Amino acid sequence: MARNITYREAINEALAQEMERDDSVIVMGEDNAGGAGSPGEDDAWGGVLGVTKGLYRKFPGRVLDTPISESAFIGAAIGAATAGLRPVAELMFVDFMGVCLDQIYNQAAKFRYMFGGKAVTPVVIRTMYGAGLRAAAQHSQCLYPVFTHIPGLKVVAPSTPYDAKGLLIQAIRDDDPVMFFEHKALYDLSGPVPEESYAIPFGEANVVREGGDVTIVTLGRMVHHSLEAAGELAGAGIECEVIDLRTTSPLDEDTILESVENTGRLVVVDEANPRCSLATDISALAAQKAFGSLRAPIELVTAPHTPVPFSNVLEDMYIPDPQRIGNAVKTVAEWAR
Amino acid sequence: MVGDAIVGVTANPLSGRDIRRLVTQASVFPMAEKANMIQRMLTAFGAVGVQRVLLSTDLGGISAAVLRAIGRHRDRDGIWPDVEFLEGQPIRQTAQDTIDAVRRMVAAGAKVIVCLGGDGTARVTASAVGEVPMLPLSTGTNNAFPVVREATIAGLAAGLVATGAVPAADVTSSAKVLEVRVGDRTETALVDVAVCTERHVGSRAVWEPTTLTQLFCTFAEPEAIGLSSILGQLSPVARADPNGITARLAPSAARQVLAPIAPGLIAPVGVAEIEPMRPGDTHAVDATAGVIAVDGERELTFEPGQRPEVRLRGDGPRCVDVPAVLAASARLGLLQPGRRLAGSAGPGHMPPTSPSTLRRYT
Amino acid sequence: MTGTQEHTALTRDQLLNAYRTMRTIREFEERVHKEFATGEIPGFVHLYAGEEASAVGICSNLNDRDSIASTHRGHGHCIAKGVDVAEMMAEIYGRQTGSCHGKGGSMHIADLSKGMLGANGIVGGGPPLICGTALAAKLKGTGGVSVAFFGDGASNQGTTLESMNLATVWNLPAVFVAENNGYAETTSSSWSVASDNIADRADAFGMPGVIVDGFDFFAVHEAASQAISRAREGGGPSLLEIKFTRYYGHFEGDQQTYRADEVEHARAELDCLNRFVGRVTQTGQLTRDDLAAVDTEVSALIDRAVGEAKAAPLPTAADLLTDVYVRY
């Protein structure tokens, strides 16, 4: 039975259901309950944007607040994973990855490989990403390309409440280290979500809109901007196929290539910065494997090569918006040699 | 013996963490060591039959460490008395915490109050003990008053007095105190009162002798550290002496002394007129404005017209004489299990040994 | 250790400046608190109200050749180090005339010409930076001192601990200031700091650690003066733990359900500005008229800053792409 709940609630529900099912699942992070040692409520925040609210009381002893010591507590989550727990640790803003990156990419990502297949590290690191809240340069980045680059890590970025719940349940059940990216501007987004538990496999993109003229490959919040652009473009007679990647590692190449072979025109929409990004990655894939099908150069709609600016007007220019996406689609649609 | 043998213990988490760490080579006295001292005392208390110990709570980690130790305590480490942490009052991290705790211990019937800290802690504890004997144990940076004593031994002494095995009257004596009055404010000092040209309490500590114009001391021992050493080198006065001593100070005075006024700080001090202080005499403060430091900490500001006064009194807190307690114990065989005590020859009053002590050793 | 420091009491001008700076911070923060509630200020702000004695007690011992690094709660340090108040307000409003041309916001205000290395959005981000400026001052012989402000939350951050260690090993002219306002977001410092006193950690890194009453300007000023002289004279780094409370939440919008009544108590009984006023009027060093004149000045300054900020131009499309590099 599906009913409308928010992206935030869907994540909370995934955690609660998995914690109910499996005793080895624990949650940790800064203010994940909120109020540790403070004179007021013990569950004061439930995470800085309320995502883990209520879990503290439902699962006593399994929701741990931490000091602000990412190297220490992300490392502890990883070590506990090798010892039989299934920790879901929160790296509050992915912008903070700098202070604990060694634990993630040199330890968790490489244990299985370095130890000849003898280690299992079933850790999930949930983290917030994305611009739009005027949180400025150090709290708004999309750093999934960095993690996508690392062999040994899986990278997941849901765009809807339905996907958020299903992908997080999958992430917790998955035996590899997973970076689970939650777009902070999507927490209040409401959508249909089944009450029962379900898992969405990794590496299976979702074709959220079918269309025969132009393929738009995207993920996260940009799925919604792309759909908005697609709606407008339909009025101008251009039908877009919008593909929501859901996971960047593993990547659903087949769905991308099938669509590009059909439309011959590709626009990649990626909120991250342009160099060494998801956008360049997808476009290289298409150029390499669907070259014969392409009828126009590939258009990339991304943020500029700058840090995220603070002021309202600047941030709005930074984020790929439906208008820019629409312009890119028109460019490939009208392109002729 | 009337009532339970109860000992109160208060430890100051903030002693040894003031500006003296920057301006002198003051000792580092870790919280862990203060907690260890308390544990050593608990073992000693248990050995001599103390039934209950009341412990102050603090946010400095001392009571938390003792609580953890109680959780890990094994029988073969010795029997510990019941420990009650004084909770339910707000901790403001000021001297008031010590005052509140000591008052509660006194009200609860503590027979001895042990305080861990420096001169400041001893002074504050003294202001709240009333008639209950105290045993100041040294930690902290400025230690003219509290004794440097191994905590186990101090624990035995406090325990023997608390159980009544050694009568308090035989082994305690009243310390001299200096009473300072500024308008309607009064402070008492156990060792020294210094008049400072500083205008504000600021970081409290006194380490610049050039700012001092007048000094009053209850005693001045040549081997003590702190401001009293200024006079201790020139005109020693013992703790047991009924008088105190006072002097005017000026950097340019003819008589100069190199005084160890703080750990690692030996400073030249100019001393002008020295005179004794007899109990009850009132001495005026010459300066028109400034700050008065009690036991090495700036405490009372005064402005023109307020005319502060200092008076020596002989009726300060009763302090436990640890060597005297342990000597009495040796004489009376208090730490010799199995020895028959009733009817034994020996000087002085001999109360029955606490039954619980006998239980442990038979 | 230097047995005989020259001891100078604060002059009338120094006291007035201290008051003016503290009052400016307080009025700035209270005004931002008000304006933020209208929804016009984008993003997040973290207010320093209540903590003024720390920034001013310390920075009043510094000059332009000295550096400081700050935290996300940086408005107070900026003002205390001499950053232009109107430009700060414009920055908070995201205007082109702001300290950072609208590209940094509240958490990233900086002015390197004044030795202000910036507010910092990363907890524990400052201490490593300050080791760098201290090293440069030492090698160039400028005599400059570098001060790292960080919170009780950051006192648990590896970068802070690593920086303290390095500063002692290299004998750097640095001072580490742990502003312990009792909370790292919602989590109390008594819970999260294992040694309970941050000052206790100094011993582990070979430097003296001192606890200071953060509600008392004079206590902070005195302790800072000693720590800074020590650093300047080659005596190495030290750690000051300032204990006080913040009057507002972690950020504006924080419902603060994790707190009890400590703010009311602090405002009524401990407030650093009230205590300062009480002391200087009691000693006669300043009069109530002197202080009232400063209050009027400061009020006008803040009003002007807000008015200018609201009227200032927003950044343009061209601004989006500039100043990523010196030359690209």
Image: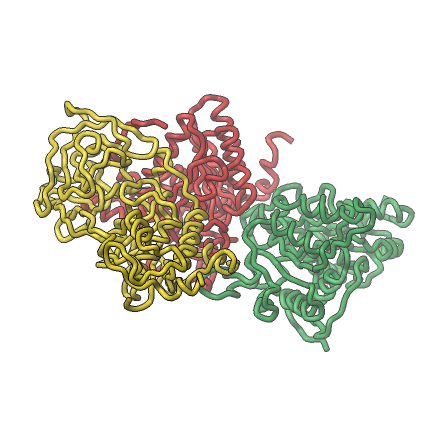
Residue B281 image position (x, y, % from top left): 8, 45
Q: Quadrant of residue C80?
A: top left
Quadrant where the image shows the N terminus of chain A = bottom right
Q: In the image, what residue occupies the spot 24% across and 43% down?
A: B295
Residue B61 image position (x, y, % from top left): 44, 53
In screen coordinates, is C313 left or right of C212? Answer: right
Q: Residue furthest left?
A: B281
Of the pair C194 and B177, the residue shown nearer to us:
B177
Q: Which chain identifier belongs to the green chain?
A: A
User: Which colour denotes chain C?
Assistant: red
Q: Which chain identifier belongs to the yellow chain?
A: B
Of the pair A11 and B177, the residue shown nearer to us:
B177
Of the pair C129 and B197, the residue shown nearer to us:
B197
Total labels drawn = 0
Inspect this view and state whether residue A165 appears.
yes
Residue A117 image position (x, y, % from top left): 82, 50
In screen coordinates, is C91 left or right of A23? Answer: left
Quadrant where the image shows the C terminus of chain A = top right
Residue A293 vertical placement versus B143 (above, below): below
Of the pair C268 and B291, the residue shown nearer to us:
B291
